[in-house]
Amino acid sequence: MVKELAENSLDAGSTQISVEVRGGGVSLIKVTDNGTGIPSGEVEFAFDRYATSKIGDLDDLESISSLGFRGEALPSIAAVAQIDMTTCADGEKAGTHLGLEDGAIANRRRQGRSQGTTVTVLNLFRKIPARLKFLKSVATENSHIANVVSQYALAFPEVKFSLSIDGRVALRTPGSGKLLDSLVEVYGAEVAGNMIELRGEAAVPRVTGMVGLPRVSRSGRGYLSFFVNRRWVNSRMLARAVEEAYHGLLMVGRHPMAVINISLPTKEVDVNIHPTKSEVKFSNERAVFSAVYRAVRQALAEQIPVPHVEAASKPVFPSAVREAASPAYVGASSDLSPSPPTPTTALPVLRVLGQLDNSYIIAEGPDGLYLIDQHAAHERVLFEKIERQRSQQEIEVQGLLEPVPLEVSPRQEAELWSHYQDLAEFGFAIEPFGGKTFLVRAVPAILHDRDWAGMLRELLDSLSEEDKSNWTEAVTSSMACHSAVRAGGALTDSEMRELVRQLEQAATPHTCPHGRPTMIHLSFGQLKKDFGRP
Ligand code: ADP
Ligand code: MG
């Protein structure tokens, strides 16, 4: 009911909508707006079944631009509750008050009010106790109501929404027209600050809105909002498009936050396929899917440094760094040949050709083809970076807003007791909290939006399993592994180029920290041989 009433207010062009509920909506639902109002002579029509002012002819049915169009909401509400409407249209001196009981008009009078409409629903299902039983608890109904109003507040940032639940202000948006302002009210400033805007390129369909950085991911899909021509809809297909775009950026079981607006010609979407109008059918599903996927992927790729971009002070020409970093170059200076021999560890400059199976980067070098395992390669790059930063005490630390309790198993606890202070040099601030709980106050920045708790547990397990003599290496490789891009994650061209550039600069580019190869090389000579060329 709250959804239908709010939609009516939006269809009436309101810029202010206030919703008041009591008793989970059973005692009272009151929606007040400043929209067009209904002229005195037409108020009764609003309660006639199938009467709507929003469809003029058959053609209108083919391209519906209003949220309501069936003329069913008000008569249906009137059938199960007491309903009062006070409304005043533009140019009228006084408004109209209409009271309905048991679906029939009980009273009508002139009543003063400014332009707009107030609908009050009282004593829901009083005469139908069987239906009352199907309502959830007051708290649950309240949370559904808050969600509906929140969704429309996100869809219509230019409308001032207010929601009061049992006399308490639950939501109030400024109506500034900026999605970010609505997001701050709905999800809080902390989350809103971690959302990035989609570019909203002019295209059909046009996709605008904001999406969350991976660090504000959620454990459910309840934070994915989709609006098609400003209608709030549920869609598995759209949810999948967004989640695909986050591929490789979120841990398994985590879901992104997003507010996605899709605009397309009304003829290309059928809104009349679902009883509550909350599902729609696109005439070209594929086009919508890929438009949403691309918009989200592009915004993420532009804003998230995956892999992390090194400081600009690094030499542009990769071999210069290799000379300094690679132990294999020791002695190379005594070689008198004009160009130094290529040490076995060095990697030539590679040209990225593409990505295979979202897991391997295909690149061309002067001497053949390279197939690079993106996860292993990134692990190698990060391993050396973490090692470098740790030895210079330059690990970037990210403080947590609130200390996070870390629960560990008895075995892990024993390890953590002996190591928690040593973890400080890697960027972890951990302290015992009693029992098997430790408090984590800060984590290495590269792990901030990753599963650092999982990383710590794995590390502790590996320490207790085998007597790891090289503690520093164990922590470093565990951190690298957990912050590296995963296999199965789509990378943009620039992400791949950046990763390959960093690998070219690595001291030991050919293996990951665990000793597994980062790449497979197929020389042109080998290729010729395989193709049987002389
Ligand atoms: P529908 O929205 O499908 O047209 P409803 O039963 O929800 O059907 O509303 C019936 C009619 O009442 C609407 O077509 C509209 O003309 C009028 N109406 C309802 N609520 C409002 C409102 N808040 N402001 C202006 N007109 C309204
Ligand atoms: Mg309606």
Image (cartoon, rainbow, N blue to C red):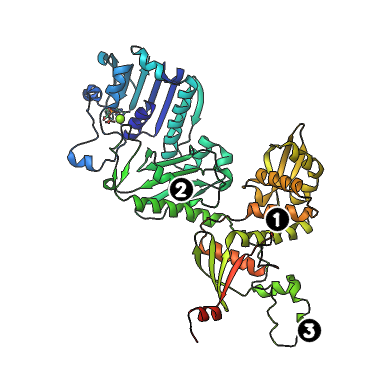
Dot 2 or dot 1: first in sequence order is: 2
Residue named by callout 3: 334
Residue named by callout 2: 242
Relative height, residue 363 to residue 340 (above, below) = above
Relative height, residue 383 to residue 78 (above, below) = below
> Can the viewer see residue 156?
no
The secondary element bearing badge 3 is classed as helix
Q: CA distance from mark 2 to mark 1?
A: 31 Å
Place of residue 443 in the rendered image (x, y in percent of width and height, measured from the top left):
70, 46
Q: Is residue 466 left or right of residue 133?
A: right
Q: What residue is drawn where x is 33% and y is 30%?
A: 8
Give the foreground label among 2 and 1: 1
Q: Nearer the viewer, residue 183 or 335?
A: 335
Query: Given the image, on which type of amino acid does mark 1 rest?
Result: Ser
Q: Nearer the viewer, residue 400 or 12?
A: 400
Place of residue 526 in the rendered image (x, y in percent of width and height, measured from the top left):
55, 78
Quarter of the figure with residue 159? top left
Q: Nearer the viewer, residue 446 or 106?
A: 446
Give the foreground label among 3 and 1: 1
Residue named by callout 1: 477
The secondary element bearing badge 1 is classed as helix
- The residue at label 3 has a CB less than 8 Å from ligand 2: no
Query: Given the image, on which type of amino acid does mark 2 rest?
Result: Val
Which label belongs to residue 212?
none
The secondary element bearing badge 2 is classed as helix
Q: CA distance from mark 3 to mark 2?
A: 56 Å
Q: Residues within 10 Å of mark 1 (few under 14, many from 20)?
A: many
